Image (cartoon, rainbow, N blue to C red):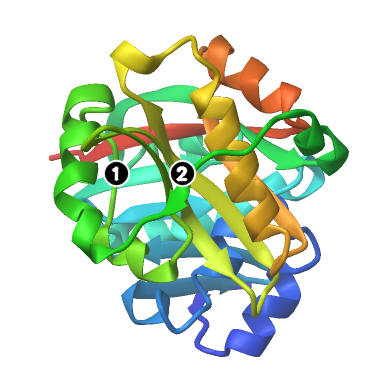
Amino acid sequence: MPVRAEHDREVLAGLLGRDPVLHAYQLGDLDDFFWPYTSWFRRGDQVALLYHGADPPTLLAFAAPPDVAELAALLRELGPLLPARLYAHLSPGLDAALSPWFHGGGAAHRKMALTDPARLALVAPAGVALGAADLPLLQTLYAEAYPGNWFDPRMLDTGQYLGVRDGGALVAVAGVHVWSPTYRVAALGNVTTHPAARGRGVASAVVAALCRRLLGTVEHVTLNVRADNTAAVRLYERLGFTVVADYGEYSLTARR
């Protein structure tokens, strides 16, 4: 069964919607907000997404363990057609499918989902909605507290970024990488606290506030976190998140 491009959003939504937590990012990218920046590939019931809205482009390919072999077959066929520079989010074992065409390193990550939202009530929420006018303050915070993070200023247009202020500065923020009321999924992202404000509970407070806000429009709130970021994993567990899948993030370059 050869790999082919897939352009039908309803078909993709049906395939990805069988596991909306594992595929939250991909489901969100079906929205008009992201759709123009996407290319989709399918082999049988397995789907891979190439997102062009970042530099380098990002490949997303996730499967439950019984389906990894079929998705690996898709990636082996797709490998020669991919850009020369690539960032990839891959379920365990799928990196080997791209190794004939790419080399590079990666790091273990975990997918988490909000499975016990009652825990949010144990944290006093904090934060106000941020908009385009807050972009300079937000970029300053990221430069000081989270250098190298992936942030698309367009995401402020979602209205799903909350910030905590101290005087005239932002000291904490929680936002989204994906938010789709249509497909009922959200993925937290770009969460950080200024080093001078850490240890005060502001990260928990702003994440709790954002999760409460998101649950008004979606069913599934998810996030990605590095496996070795134990402080972040524990914070999210206290707020009701559970690890639901492992995966790797890789910076890949085509072999000459």
146 left or right, relative to 59: left
Say whether residue 173 is left or right of residue 226: left
Q: Mark 1–mark 2 contact, CB under 8 Å?
A: yes
Q: Position of residue 132 (x, y in %)?
A: 24, 64
Q: Position of residue 4 (x, y in %)?
A: 50, 78
Between 101 and 232, the residue placed more toward the observer is 232
Q: Residue at x 41, y 61 (%)?
A: 78
**Residue 189 tag number:** 2
At a point 62% along the width and 54% down the height, the residue shown is 71
Viewer-proximal residue among 52 and 231: 231
x and y, in percent, of residue 183 in the image: 67, 74
Picture quadrant of residue 133: bottom left
Residue 196, located in which quarter of the rendered image? top left
Of the residues shown, which amino acid type is indicated by label 1?
Trp
Element class at badge 1? loop
The residue sitting at 34% across, 62% down in the picture is 156
Query: Is 192 located above or below residue 129 in the figure?
Result: above
Q: CA distance from mark 1 to mark 2?
A: 9 Å
Extreme-front residue of the structure: 167
Residue 69, can we see it?
no
Q: Residues within 10 Å of mark 2 (few under 14, many from 20)?
A: many
x then y, percent, for residue 117: 82, 42
Quadrant in the picture for the C terminus: top left
* Residue at the spot of label 1: 150
In which quadrant will I find the N terminus? bottom right
Relative placement, left or right, of 43 versus 88 is right
Inspect the image, locate mark 2, and give the three-letter code of the amino acid beneath it. Gly
Residue 85 seen anywhere in this rendered image of the structure: yes
Q: Dot 1 surroundings within 10 Å: few (below 14), some, or many (20 or more)?
A: few
